[in-house]
Amino acid sequence: MSERADTSELRDTHRQSAAPVDRDRLTRLLGGPDLAWLIDRVRRRMARDEPLTGPVSLSAPTAAQRAAAERLLGRAPGAGRALSVRLDAVDAVLRRSGISPDGLEAAVTALTGHVARLADVREREERAWRDAYAPLDELIRTGRPELADWAERIVSDGLVRRLARTPQAAKSLLGDTAKALCRLPAEPAVSLPAFAAGAFGDAHALDDGTPLATLVLSGARTLTGFPDGSGAEWRREAWASAGLLKDALSSTVLTLGLRGSPALDWSSDEGEPAVLTLRQLTRHPPRTAPPVLRVCENPAVLATAADTLGAACPPLVCLQGQPSAAALILLRHLHAHGTTLRYHGDFDWGGLRIASGLLRRVPWHPWRYTVADYRTAVAATPLASPLTGTPTTAAWDPDLPAALTGLGVRIEEETVLDDLLADLGR
């Protein structure tokens, strides 16, 4: 038997053999509101297993509180800013008077009820938390051993406790999390609401901001190796990496000359642009990957390439501004299958930010998108618009921002369209 169990047994034996307390006299002596502060101090010490000896003090006592303490101890009224009472003296009064033959601890217990020891409370709580983590252990043991480090991290960094607050809520939350992760990645891809409805009977169970969505997305990213990030588009892309589609039809990417599916092959043969949805890309990504893929920012580049080059245009993708989840899924897929990506965008602060955001998500090389290309374009465009906005960096060419600041003009993709078409036509 453990030492703690021995101590608990001794306490139980002590309670069974304790001398009776005179409750009426005890209530009159210690049960009034003016000595409530004293009872509270005693209960705190009992909870911490501290000895009931020495003084306890009350700052700025009322006259009634001071008078009650003096009556308790049978001493003359004192003065001063604080009121001090020795617990040894109170214990002695209770024992001598017969009100509580076993002293102060027995009296306070009789007056206010059992005092839970903090050590016992903490042990019970930690035991409850260990039990709450059981669904994670079961998940790792029965089907997802690759989540072991993730599970240890969300426990050790306190994420589960912050989300759930109590062991009971945590066990339910982790049970649902394990239920979802057992089914991921989803093959074939399904809509996120449909998955939530099938797993939990609630299409909104994995809505943004819920504790369950936070944990499931975190675990899903571990399963798929999806990188850190933030924002609505990042979450859409992260869910999609696990086969769960948020609004899978409105997220699209524009392509020309890309092959790898019957629809893409037909569009390429006809020299027509194709619009791919996130749903298509997660369910049926291109089966082939070109050696090189050029990527532009503005639809005018792709539209003009279709008009000028038609079926002879090499693979080209247009971001249409900030890269969508569909665009990122496509570019990642092609990069993973050996495609070299070459990117061009507007020479302005907004264009640099788009390019930087793309570079953080998928590697690319510049396509006429360096400081030398910018200087050449500026020299050829005497009526270029002035540069406005807040400066930013360009990791692919650190000298480019300084050149933009120094020359002070913006060069849109349409301005250098002939050069881009010449590259595509080679």
Image (spheres, rainbow, N blue to C red):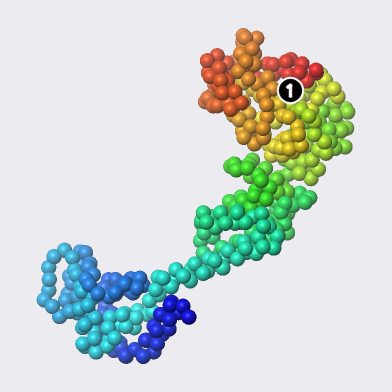
Asked if residue 14 shows in the view, the reply is yes
Residue 304, image x and y in percent?
77, 21
> Where residue 38 appears, x then y in whole percent?
26, 73
User: Is residue 408 shown to the viewer in this render?
Assistant: no
For residue 209, above or below residue 39: above
Identify the residue at image location x=72%, y=51%.
Answer: 185
Position of residue 226 relative to residue 406, above or below, is: below
Numbered marks: total? 1
Which of the 4 image quarters holds residue 103? bottom left
Element carrying mark 1: helix
Q: In the picture, residue 262 is in which quadrant? A: top right
- Residue 127 position, x and y percent, is 51, 69
- Compared to residue 96, the image places residue 379 above or below, namely above
Choose top left, top right, bottom left or bottom right for residue 195: bottom right
Pick whichever, 12 or 167, lies toward us: 12
Tell me: 161 left or right of 356: left
The x, y position of residue 394, in whole percent, is 58, 26
Q: Amino acid at mark 1?
A: Val
Q: Residue at x 24, y 74 (%)?
A: 53
> Is 128 displayed left or right of 419 in the figure?
left
- From the image, which quarter does the C terminus lie in? top right
> Callout 1 environment at 10 Å: few (<14), some (14 to 19), or many (20+)?
many
Apparent side of residue 167 relative to residue 280 in the rendered image (left or right): left
Residue drawn at (62%, 56%) of the image? 148
Give the residue at mark 1: 301
Q: Would residue 356 be found to the left or right of residue 261 on screen?
A: left
Q: Nearer the viewer, residue 203 or 255?
A: 255
* Residue drawn at 44 percent across, 68 percent down: 122
